Image (tube, rainbow, N blue to C red):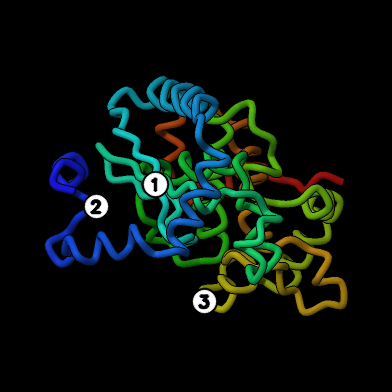
């Protein structure tokens, strides 16, 4: 125990006594979780290769980026803290990525466990870094929030060029097809109801927060993916980058509403 605490001091706060640590080690549920995680991740060479590639891409666009020390662990399936990044250190909770059909996730909503897969690790790692790189948003309008999230998605495009769009945004094949096929109608809905420049925070839950579907208050809602505002913001940012000669670092600092005006965005029919 002393050697373990010395090596991983950041995992042992003063309040976490040796007796608590030993009790955790001897807990049957913890042991089962560890066993299942080891069954899938006894060899993490594939993940290591992905991390090396990701860090190289980030370094290419941001020379100040420093590769963190990566530690894999189990966290009692702490979904909200699946990846923790703090500049020089990154903690990855492998027990959150045992596969969407794993029995440990049987009580999870489908839209949550959809992303509890090995393939999602590298996306979550990239997102944890992006969240630190992108300045907090001052614009409280719906379009401002959409574009802020769209910038994050565009960074994923640059950092993970070989990863599919559906994996980057966490949609199933059916859900991303719905988004693509209904882009015109989504945009029309936002325009007709004058939502773009609204500061109503209820729009966050309807169109930006993680959810099984977006809330248009229509009969077809359950066919839509959640966070459709993020997906649309992504399309707007893509349009902006196609129509303007700016660097990735310039993209991060440009005002959202200025970006929107210069994007020349038109939904694809």
Q: Determine whether 25 is above or below 167 in the image.
A: below
- Which x, y percent locates residue 22? 26, 60
**Sequence-earlier tag: 3 or 1:** 1
The foreground one among 12 and 24 is 24
Q: How far apart are marks 1 and 2 (CA)?
A: 10 Å
At 51% from the left and 58% from the top, the residue drawn is 144
Q: Which mark, by number, is residue 201?
A: 3
- Which x, y percent locates residue 130? 42, 42
- Which x, y percent locates residue 134? 39, 45
At 84% from the left and 56% from the top, the residue drawn is 182
The foreground one among 84 and 259 is 84
Q: Mark 1 — residue?
A: 73
**Sequence-earlier tag: 1 or 2:** 2
**Sequence-earlier tag: 3 or 2:** 2
- Which x, y percent locates residue 212? 70, 67
Density class for disc 2 (Cα within 10 Å; few <14, some 14-19, many ≥20) is few
Q: Determine whether 151 is above or below 101 in the image.
A: above
Q: Which mark, by number, is residue 11?
A: 2
Q: Which mark, by number, is residue 2?
A: none
Instruction: Indicate left or right for 36 with 90 as reference.
Output: right
The foreground one among 208 and 193 is 208
At 60% from the left and 38% from the top, the residue drawn is 240
Q: Determine which quarter of the picture holds residue 59.
A: top left
At 51% from the left and 73% from the top, the residue drawn is 199
Determine contact: label 1, label 2, CB under 8 Å. yes
Q: Determine which quarter of the picture holds residue 7.
A: top left
Q: Distance between the residues labelled 3 and 1?
A: 36 Å
């Amino acid at each position: 125990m002393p050697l373990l605490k010395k090596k991983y001091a950041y995992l042992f706060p003063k309040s976490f006594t040796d007796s608590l640590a030993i009790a955790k080690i001897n807990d049957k549920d913890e042991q089962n979780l560890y066993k299942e995680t080891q069954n899938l991740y006894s060899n993490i060479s594939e993940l290591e290769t992905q991390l090396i590639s990701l860090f190289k891409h980030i370094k290419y666009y941001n020379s100040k980026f420093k590769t963190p020390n990566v530690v894999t662990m189990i966290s009692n399936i702490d979904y909200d803290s699946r990846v923790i990044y703090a500049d020089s250190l990154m903690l990855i909770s492998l027990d959150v990525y045992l596969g969407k059909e794993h029995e440990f996730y049987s009580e999870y909503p489908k839209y949550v466990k959809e992303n509890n897969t090995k393939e999602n690790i590298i996306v979550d790692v990239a997102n944890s870094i992006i969240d630190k790189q992108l300045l907090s948003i001052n614009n409280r309008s719906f379009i401002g929030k959409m574009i802020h999230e769209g910038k994050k998605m565009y960074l994923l495009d640059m950092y993970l060029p070989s990863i599919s769009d559906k994996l980057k945004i966490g949609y199933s094949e059916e859900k991303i097809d719905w988004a693509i096929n209904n882009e015109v109608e989504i945009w029309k809905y936002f325009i007709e109801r004058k939502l773009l420049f609204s500061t109503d925070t209820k729009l966050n839950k309807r169109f930006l927060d993680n959810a099984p579907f977006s809330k248009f208050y229509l009969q077809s809602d359950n066919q839509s993916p959640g966070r459709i505002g993020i997906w649309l913001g992504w399309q707007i940012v893509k349009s902006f980058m196609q129509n303007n000669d700016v660097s990735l670092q310039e993209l991060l600092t440009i005002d959202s509403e200025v970006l929107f005006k210069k994007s020349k965005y038109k939904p694809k029919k």
